[in-house]
Image (cartoon, rainbow, N blue to C red):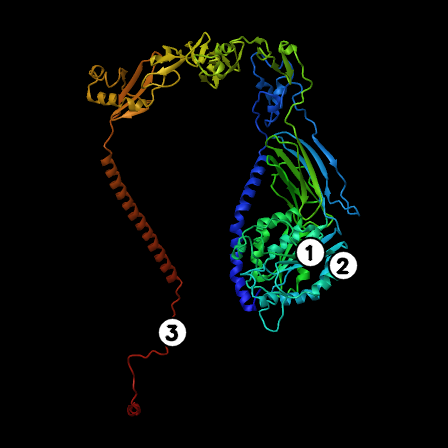
Amino acid sequence: MKLTTENSNTTAKWRAPYIVHHIRDRERFRTQPFSLLLNSHLCVCASGAKTCVPRPSCSECIQSPGCAWCSAKGFLQAGEPSERRCDAKEALTSRGCKEPYPPETDETLLMKDKELSASDDIIQLRPQQIDFQLRVGVPQTFKVSFKRAEGYPIDLYYLMDLSFSMGDDLDMIKKLSQDMVSTLQSFTKKLRIGFGSFVDKVALPYVSEMKKKRRDPSPHRGTSCQPAFSFQNLLNLTTDTAAFENKVIGQMISANLDSPESGFDAIMQAAVCKEVIGWDDGTKILVYTSDDTFHMAGDGRLAGLREPPDGNCHLSPSGLYDGTRFDYPSIGQLARVLTANNIQLIFAVTKNISAAYEELSKMIPQSVVGVLESDSSNVVQLIKNAYNSLSSSVVLEHHGAPQGLEVAYQAHCTSPSPGPPGLRPWSQRAECKDIKINQQVDFYVQLNMSRCLEQTEFHLSVQGISEQLKVVVRMKCECDCGPVEEASPSCSGHGTLHCGTCSCDPGFLGQACDCQQSEDHVSLDEKCRHGGSSQLCSGHGSCECGKCACQRSFSGQFCECDDSNCAKSNQQLCGGNGKCVCGKCNCSGAYGGEACDCSTHTDRCQTAGRPCSGSGECLCNRCVCKGGFDGDHCSHIPNNCTKYEKCVTCLSKHKKEEVAEACGVPCEGAVLSHKKTLRDAYCSFQSFLYDVTLTPQGIVHLRYAEMPSSIDKTWVIIGSSVSGILFIGLLIIVISRLLLELSYRREYQSFVASQQQTNWKETRNPLFKGATTTVMNPLHMDDE
């Protein structure tokens, strides 16, 4: 209930995140073990081929993964234990067993396999029943097909919150009830619809206990409400759509004190009261509408309600549920009840609390969340979208599989199916999304048994669909090797032969019952114990009539000798040159050593002179060189130039006549040979050139010679440098003088040429005035 719109929104804002985390915390203990269990199942299914662990009897053998049993007479050699009859089928065949048990036959029977049909007799799941015979650790695979039929019957139960804050929503639902029915009828003509409502438990602190408030809990004057209730079934599922419309129109709002409602109580009772509500075998949809959060398990303790719901129907004849006896259901209980009854849940809630319901939907299979407008005006479109979302998702799941039987899936959602499963991984979940009506999807289901079980059966179904596939599993844990042969000759006439092994009569022992047990039968075993050991035949054989029959590579009176535990050489036992006897190598004639890898021949050590060039010892036909020598024949002196530098130093300190006596030790007994010149020497030290060679007789020869005297290059370099500088300077001066002379000559020739081209003429310059002036006196002119 919300007393005012503002208060309700505020409450929802702080409570929705709390509900989200509260759901996660309180359901973690339920979801985690379930996930771990499925993961372990998946690992077993995907583990692949297993190595056979031999067992002594046929029944134990076929319960060991990867094993088969050979019951043929004479299959075992003398002294071989019965476990040798149990091995991988390929190994038994390679050892001569013609018909290992069990034979490779098809152990799957389709007991009921009707084709998919969308006619009056609708069949959406194929096959309908299958019979398997399983062995431990040997998985079997079969195919399941599903096709959602058009027009499949729908049972829709509309569950509405009638708390005070839903008043406007109720008015809108009254107007849209006809549209809701018309929309659902567009999916199928086989529609049945029902109606129920909820408020909260009639107890403090959820609902006021005042008499006046119990009669009319309305928070406002002038507004009347019906008394509060936990859940009420108002209309059973019916094809009379008019009755649904009338029932919705006749409803009144109610009220409670706190914000959360008793929606979980309503969902639980609507799901478990199958006969009262009238659920059928069609698609079952429960539409839950509310504008606030929900009470969950533990909240009932506020009213002193500690007993959890018992999962039974508690509706009164009038359809009311008295919620004051039990606590609220847990999310896990709701998930189990809805799954068991194959009911799909649509949460139609307002935006302010949608986050809490989104988290809740993750924990409830086949549930979706749609966001309502504040007045529920979009409820018809919301239901349509939610139904399309649910119907487009196909999830195949199993129910009732016992522990020890693992179930894994592969989903082939495309059409047509790509074929049988190959190397694709197996999954713990089989789901296809965005599937259309009449589109076929295929699932491959793998069964694997981890231990022997009694004959069992379980069911596979698609979420939201009532059809089921019944799977009957029979366990192959005992051998059927043919008739039992009593007093069999193969058992020396003193035992019963079954599956190739003898069960000896009293007083007889042995693989073939050929050993008569004496009165002090313990002494027979004592003869097979070595040095008071508690193990018979050292644990490597069987005691047959007081004598050890050793297994595999063991030998000796008490099987104490391991003929495969000798030293190896070149990856071979005893180097391939001997025989391993009781942990030691007995080598053939020309070989010795712990692993028979030491040859007594010396042909690989021979050289032209002495063996190993006189510088090593021939061991196991290989040269072991002395210090200072290496190579296959010890004919190489490593770092010989550096090694004899001390010898050269000694040569430089003594005269030629004194060298032989004075330098014997530093020259390590080398034969010294002085040369005037030594052009091909490859060693040099101080003022000597020298080289070192080893003769085939193992004698070291050192030839040496003084280096030729050299000119002091310092003055040569200085003189050359000075001469070069002077020469270059003179050359520069000469070149510059020649260039200057050439320049002068060009200037002179140019001047001469210009003089020859000049033309001189004598003319008077009009501006020129002479230096003297003549003046004529006219007085004197007459006298003349």
Q: Which residue is mark 3?
A: 763
* CA–CA distance in space, label 1 to label 2: 21 Å
- Among the 4 quarters of the image, the one containing residue 288: bottom right
- Identify which amino acid the numbered label 1 is placed on: Pro
First in residue order: circle 1 vs circle 2:
2
- Identify which amino acid the numbered label 2 is placed on: Asp
Inspect this view and state whether residue 365 appears. yes
Of residue 214 and residue 592, the one placed in the foreground of this image is 214
Left or right? Give the position of 386 relative to 53: right
- Identify which amino acid the numbered label 3 is placed on: Thr
Give the quarter of the figure containing the C terminus: bottom left
Residue mark closest to the camera, 2 vs 3 = 2
Residue mark closest to the camera, 1 vs 2 = 1
Disc 1, SS: loop
Q: Which residue is mark 1?
A: 317
Residue mark closest to the camera, 1 vs 3 = 1
Disc 3, SS: loop
User: Where is 242 relative to 364, above or below?
Assistant: below
User: Where is 141 relative to 434, above or below?
Assistant: above
**Label annotation for residue 240:** 2
First in residue order: circle 1 vs circle 3:
1
* CA–CA distance in space, label 1 to label 3: 160 Å
